[in-house]
Image: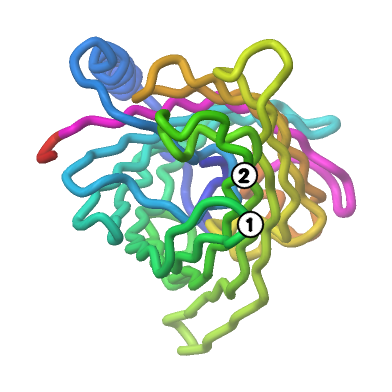
């Protein structure tokens, strides 16, 4: 997914061998699951721009990603996160989780939890776009726990140039996505509320090598998970549809450090107006749990 949800003012928590062991066990379990279930795949973190789709009714999806953030003159920061979603109906999906941490200078901080319902208003292929809407709340687990962040947005997607009507209709040559909404912060201390415009635009296109490998790119005014983040920010990379139910991502992300909170989200490094860059790897898996 991609950005850290932490805020300032959190005492550091030292990471121990037991945490490392639990993370390793979870990674092994998730990786082993690929040999058991078969389904379909669509958009995934760490890319930020969301598409106007949901998983099918009864499907369980897990999205896990991690990366290294680098800023000039600072030590690298490591982040790992996992999100889980369930198709309640063919139009309604509920995503929850955000289990993860950031690690820098021998210190670890937990990431905030996420709850997000998403509903497909209109589903279409070709020049007529699909439309969906989502809303989310982030539950603070560290940093300033009086800051409750969230967002509300609409997703617009064009799924173009499907080569064979007998295949998955979403196995198209080009997808274009646009997100528009607002992200907000409620400060429980002084009981104040802030909001700002959120937008993102991205695309996914097949490569000359194979249909299984796609090139993706996007620009956005900050990750919706990070209230302080704003434009300019970008991500670009490749997506590999390893099997119909599993995909892997490799991403380069860039964002300009404009405030102390943004630099904290980026791992704590960098000076104002400097860019920091993140290399991330993502893994998505779909399970026909109740389908």
Identify the residue shown where x is 48% and y is 53%. 10
Eyeballing the image, is 143 above or below 165? below
Q: Is residue 220 left or right of residue 27?
A: right
Residue bounds of the magenta highlight: 267-288
The answer to the question of whether label 2 and label 1 lie on touching residues, with beta carbons closer than 8 A, is: yes
Colouring convention used in this rendered image of the protein? rainbow
Q: Is tag 2's residue or tag 1's residue first in the polypeptide sequence?
A: 1
User: Which residue ends up furthest to the front in the rendered image?
Assistant: 165
Label 2 and label 1: CA atoms lie apart by 7 Å
Residue 269 shown in magenta: yes
Identify the residue shown where x is 48% and y is 69%. 149
The spot of residue 248 in percent (x, y) is 50, 22
User: Which residue ends up furthest to the bottom in the rendered image?
Assistant: 191
Q: Is residue 61 left or right of residue 44?
A: left
The spot of residue 14 in percent (x, y) is 42, 31
Identify the residue shown where x is 50% and y is 36%. 102
The spot of residue 252 in percent (x, y) is 72, 30
Eyeballing the image, is 168 above or below 116? above
Between 44 and 124, the residue placed more toward the observer is 124
Residue 275 visible, this angle: yes
Q: Secondary structure at mark 2?
A: strand
Crowd tier of the residue under label 2, counting other residues whose Cα lies within 10 Å: few below 14, some 14–19, many 20 or above: many
Which quarter of the rendered picture does the C terminus lie within? top left
Q: Quadrant of residue 289?
A: top left
Q: Quadrant of residue 208?
A: top right
Which residue bears the numbered disc 2? 160
Eyeballing the image, is 1 above or below 17? below
Which residue bears the numbered disc 1? 127
Q: Secondary structure at mark 1?
A: loop
The spot of residue 190 in percent (x, y) is 49, 88
């Amino acid at each position: 997914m991609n950005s850290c949800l932490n805020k300032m003012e959190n005492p550091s928590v030292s990471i121990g061998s037991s945490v490392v062991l639990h993370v390793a066990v979870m990674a092994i379990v998730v990786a082993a699951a690929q040999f058991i279930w078969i389904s379909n795949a669509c958009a995934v973190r760490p890319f930020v721009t969301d598409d106007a789709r949901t998983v099918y009714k009864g499907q369980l999806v897990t999205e896990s990603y991690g990366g290294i953030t680098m800023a000039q003159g600072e030590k690298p920061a490591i982040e790992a996160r996992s999100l889980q979603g369930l198709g309640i109906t063919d139009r309604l999906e509920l995503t929850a989780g955000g289990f993860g941490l950031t690690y820098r200078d021998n210190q670890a901080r937990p990431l905030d939890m996420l709850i997000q319902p998403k509903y497909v208003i209109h589903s279409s292929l070709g020049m007529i776009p699909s439309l969906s809407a989502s809303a989310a709340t982030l539950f603070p687990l560290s940093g300033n726990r009086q800051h409750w962040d969230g967002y509300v947005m609409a997703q617009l997607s064009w799924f173009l140039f499907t080569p064979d009507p007998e295949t998955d209709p979403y196995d198209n040559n080009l997808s274009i996505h646009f997100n528009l909404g607002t992200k907000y912060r409620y400060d429980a201390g002084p009981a104040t509320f802030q909001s700002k415009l959120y937008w993102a635009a991205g695309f996914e296109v097949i490569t000359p090598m194979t249909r299984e490998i796609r090139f993706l790119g996007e620009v956005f005014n900050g990750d919706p998970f990070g209230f302080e983040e704003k434009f300019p920010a970008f991500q670009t990379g490749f997506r590999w549809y390893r099997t119909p139910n599993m995909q892997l991502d490799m991403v380069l992300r860039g964002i300009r450090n404009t405030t102390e909170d943004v630099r904290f989200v980026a791992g704590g490094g960098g000076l104002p107006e400097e860019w920091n860059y993140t290399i991330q790897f993502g893994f998505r898996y779909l399970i026909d749990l109740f389908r």
